[in-house]
Image (tube, rainbow, N blue to C red):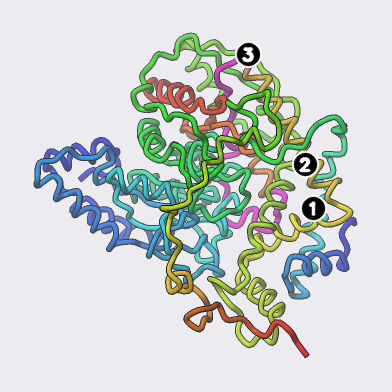
Amino acid sequence: MNLAGLTIDSARSAIAERKTSATALAETFYAKIESDDPKIGAYLILSKERGLEKAAEIDRLVEKGEKLPPLAGAPVGIKDVLVTKSVRTTAGSKILGNYIPPYDCTAVARLEAAGAVVLGKLNCDEFAMGSSNENSAFKPVHNPRDVSRVPGGSSGGSAAAVAADMAVATLGSDTGGSIRQPASFCGVVGLKPTYGRVSRYGLIAFASSLDHVGPFGKTVKDAALMLRTIAGRDPMDSTSAEVPVPDYVAELDKPIAGMKVGVAKEYFGEGLDAEVRSAVEAAIQKLAKLGCEIVEVSLPHTKFAIPAYYLVATAEASSNLARFDGVRYGLRAKGVHSLSDMYRRSRDQGFGAEVKRRIMLGTYALSAGYYDAYYLKAQRVRTLLTRDFEEAFKKVDVIVAPTSPTPAFKLGEKVDDPLAMYLADIYTVTANLAGIPGISIPVGQTKEKLPIGMQIFGKHFAESTILRAANAYEIAA
Amino acid sequence: MKVTEKDVTYVADLANLELSEDERGRMVRDLNSILAHVDSLSELDTNDVPPMAQVSDRYGLDESKRGSERFAYASRDDVKEGLRKSFPTEVALANAPESDGMFFKVPKVIER
């Protein structure tokens, strides 16, 4: 079977027409993972029992001649920050190395209810903190397009699994670019929905006001199918929005002629790689040829996005990660003599260097004497960054920009310089601060054959619009 | 240098981290490098800009409402019967590093 060409729809059709079975398909993927993943490192945990049980259920539907659900038999992988009942979930951290969740996160439950087969849990930066996947406590992920390079992060395993045909589609999480940047580095489609579009119930929290769950796929249509499945109000997440979920798939083919596409000069400035720039500019020209009107817009506060983001994100992280104390779950240090000694030593032993750095930065930004100067200041700048988008979206329907200033960098290249690593997120963090949706799609490659990604941002809850633009580009490309 | 080793020790204490001597030295260096970059925010006059803690109040809601009223979408009527069941004790304790079957066990809290 040609796994490279497989999509959610073609998997479902092949199963419905009995060209294969859901079980055979899952087994094919497990064999592929066994042979190819040792050099990629995308998977942390395989959920064979659960996956094959779901596949058997789909096969029974076929036997009985019943209608198959929309994602029937689709082999998917799940970023390991999303909890899965009875399947070990680590968040890429030693502190949760043996954690077996007692419940399912909503997004995974909805995928399975729609017929998807969960193959396993995907590698990521520890607690989704990182831009290269090198902060995983277990192993790095290698970019399938060039194994000497990083896949991006923090959802590096989710992007690499799709790029290496070790899953048809995957779920990731995006707090500052963690879906879009790895999608761009690995040459796949990655979508961060509007804040509140997809429930965060069961997503291990990094920064609650910035965390989003979203899909990866090989095609825009698969991303749309995944989003349609996981989106919508969930009583278990009070920030999930009471906004109807349109049929993203049905709306994909609506024409885009006349769509106003904004281009902000702030996203094409210093530090942007020349090859990335020319690929994105060519993609913008293609959108113009498809009948879009290209409009210059300004997002004047963009250069303040990284500092604002890293204060807000780390402040929230320092609070969220206080729960890891060795009492209810997770690692507990041995040979401790008091409760506070146990907290400290468990956290010291359980957290990696980047997680400690962010807890420290966030605690500092929230501490007496610095709260106003750092945390409150960053929250005010967040308002300015959000207003930038609100102003721009008065003039345009979507805004396009490079996803990352560079293509995938080498493993080890930035590990000793946290600031350089943070700056890799320069084009992605703004969408998290403002809560607007963004999709990264492949728009070519460098001379060294490294993928280049372009982002399309939309207004709050305008996923249909960005998916349509992305789909039109994909078909024309 | 804004952040000293003494600050790092103080903040680590607040965060319930111990940090080795090596880690503390590295933390001084990293926090100073990051904060130097963050300081660019002081170029902006934000006195009249309200802080933004989250995004949910920026779309689709009744603009005339203020405060908790704006978040009415996130509330529901009280449920008196038929509430979702809590986890049974053994499930809630299943991941505990130490328990006695009823409670989480921790080292002595009060030291004499």
Query: Considering only order in the chain, which callout, 1 or 3, is on the residue closer to the N terminus?
Result: 1
Circle 2: element type = helix
Tell whether A4 sits left or right of A449.
left
| Residue B9, horizontal then vertical, whole percent | 82, 69
Question: What is the chief secondary structure element of the magenta stretch?
Answer: loop
| Residue A442 relative to residue A413: left or right | left
The furthest residue to the bottom? B112
Q: Amino acid at mark 2?
A: Ala
Disc 2 marks which residue? A378
As measured in the structure, the alpha-carbon distance from the residue carrying label 3 to the one carrying label 2 is: 27 Å
Query: Which residue matches tag 1?
Result: A365
Please provide the residue range marked out in magenta.
A394-420
From the viewer's side, name the closer residue of A26 and A69.
Answer: A69
Q: Is residue A422 above or below residue A268?
A: below
Residue A415 on the magenta span: yes
* Badge 3 or badge 2: first in the primary sequence: 2
In the picture, residue A238 is in which quadrant? top right
Q: Outermost residue, front direction?
A: B80
Up/down of A298 relative to A450, above or below: above
Q: Quadrant of residue B39?
A: top right
Q: Quadrant of the C terminus of chain A?
A: top left
Label 2 CA crowd tier, 10 Å (few <14, some 14–19, many 20+) = many
Q: Which mark is residue A395?
A: 3
Q: Chain of mark 2?
A: A
Q: Is residue A56 left or right of residue A134?
A: left
- What is the secondary structure assignment of the residue under circle 1? helix
Q: CA distance from mark 3 to mark 1?
A: 36 Å
